Image: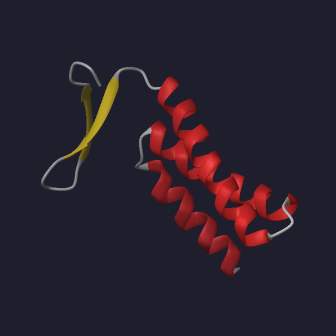
Amino acid sequence: MKKLVVLMVLAVSLSACSRTEQGAAVGGLGGAAVGAAVAGDPVEGAVVGGAVGAVAGALIGRATESGQCRYRGRNGRVYTARCPEGY
């Protein structure tokens, strides 16, 4: 039950993120899990795998964005608009 609650909170929190942020989070978690499982030292493997996974996930997420950026207003409402030049 506790794992289910943690997964639900994670899913809800990721739903408000951009694709770049979602990719970084999922890549970091996956990379840390794989790194801890296959490395000789689980802690070092998790750190390295998490870092590599986060960077790779962010790059993949960034490539899938449509030129629209997400903004959060003062009232907390999230909205999308065209990204500024050079972004």
**Residue at x 21% of width, y 55% of height:** 76
Total marks in image: 0
Q: Is residue 63 visible?
A: yes
**Residue at x 78% of width, y 64% of height:** 36
**Residue at x 79% of width, y 56% of height:** 34
- The extreme bottom residue here reads 2
Query: Relative to the observer, which residue lies in front, 26 or 54?
Result: 54
Compared to residue 69, the image places residue 51 above or below, namely below
Q: Quadrant of the N terminus?
A: bottom right
Q: Is residue 13 left or right of residue 40?
A: left
- The extreme left residue here reads 74
Coordinates of residue 86 in the picture (x, y in percent): 26, 20
Q: Is residue 8 left or right of residue 4?
A: left
Coordinates of residue 23 in the picture (x, y in percent): 55, 42
Coordinates of residue 6 in the picture (x, y in percent): 60, 72
Query: Relative to the observer, which residue lies in front, 77 or 43?
Result: 43
Query: Relative to the observer, which residue lies in front, 28 or 3?
Result: 28
Q: Is residue 29 visible?
A: no
Coordinates of residue 30 in the picture (x, y in percent): 70, 53
Q: Is residue 59 left or right of residue 45?
A: left
Type of colouring: secondary structure
